[in-house]
Image: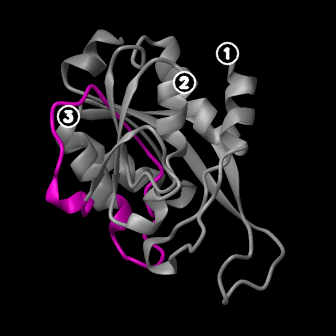
Amino acid sequence: MDRKRLAMEIDSLPTFRRPKLSLEQYATPGDIVATIVWDAYMRGLIAGRRVADLGCGTGRFSYAVRLLGGSPICVEIDPDALSAVDDVDAVICDVDRICIRNVDLVVMNPPFGVWRRGADVRFLDVALHISDIVYTIHKLSTLDYIVRRASLVGAEVHVLDRVYIPLPPIYRHHRKRVHRVEAVVLRIERGSVARRGK
């Protein structure tokens, strides 16, 4: 398995059957999932590790983690989305409830806070509460704020990639064939983990 093959595997997975705008549900493209999970894998953070996939949706990150030898835990509030997830431990709960603990790593593509203001920050706060290493995606326009927010808990932000996420017209208000959102793929490390990386 290499990064390109991993991306192809992820893109072959089913997407949301009934996406919910209030939860900002979109399928994360396979190449972005592969960027995150492959980076973590190459750093020895996947194989044999417990990895939380916060707001997992249809489980794309979890599937990639499992393919590379990790033990993923899907955390999702929407049972409809979880109906597409097979052979992965799943917890149905609101991310704010902090319903899991003792994980080695968090991977996530949180809501960007367009329809639920502050949702991106709530996900980030919970992720940094349950793990010292978080891989996440945020709108490029929020990067400075994310860096400041992470610094409040002694975490450092590393930009892995700048991407354009294609959003297909799956909701009624969409008028474009594809809308592209400029985003950043981040690895955030807290405390002793960040210091060891220097």
Question: Residue drawn 43% across and 51% down?
Answer: 56
Label 3, label 2: how many angstroms apart (C-alpha)? 32 Å
Question: Residue drawn 35% across and 67% down?
Answer: 119
Quadrant of image for the N terminus: top right
Image x and y of residue 48, in percent: 35, 14
Image x and y of residue 96, in percent: 20, 61
As shown in the figure, which amino acid type bears the numbered disc 1?
Answer: Met
Quadrant of image for the C terminus: top left
Question: Residue drawn 75% across and 25% down?
Answer: 4
Determine if the magenta segment contains residue 139: no
Q: Is residue 50 above or below residue 31?
A: above
As shown in the figure, which amino acid type bears the numbered disc 2?
Answer: Leu
Residue corresponding to mark 1: 1
Residue corresponding to mark 2: 67
Q: Nearer the viewer, residue 51 or 187?
A: 51
Q: Is residue 153 above or below residue 123?
A: above
Q: Residues within 10 Å of mark 2 (few under 14, many from 20)?
A: some
Local secondary structure at mark 1: loop
Left of 173 or right of it: where is 188?
Answer: left
Give the number of the disc on residue 129. Answer: none
Local secondary structure at mark 3: loop
Residue lying at the far right of the rendered structure: 177
* In front: label 3 or label 2: 2
Among the two numbered marks 3 and 1 on one chain, the one whose residue lies closer to the N terminus: 1
Q: Are marks 3 and 2 in contact (CB under 8 Å)?
A: no
As shown in the figure, which amino acid type bears the numbered disc 3?
Answer: Gly
Region of the chain picked out in magenta, as a range: 93-120
Q: Nearer the viewer, residue 90 or 25?
A: 90
Main SS of the magenta part reads loop
Question: Residue drawn 26% across and 34% down?
Answer: 155
Q: Residues within 10 Å of mark 3 (few under 14, many from 20)?
A: some
Residue corresponding to mark 3: 154
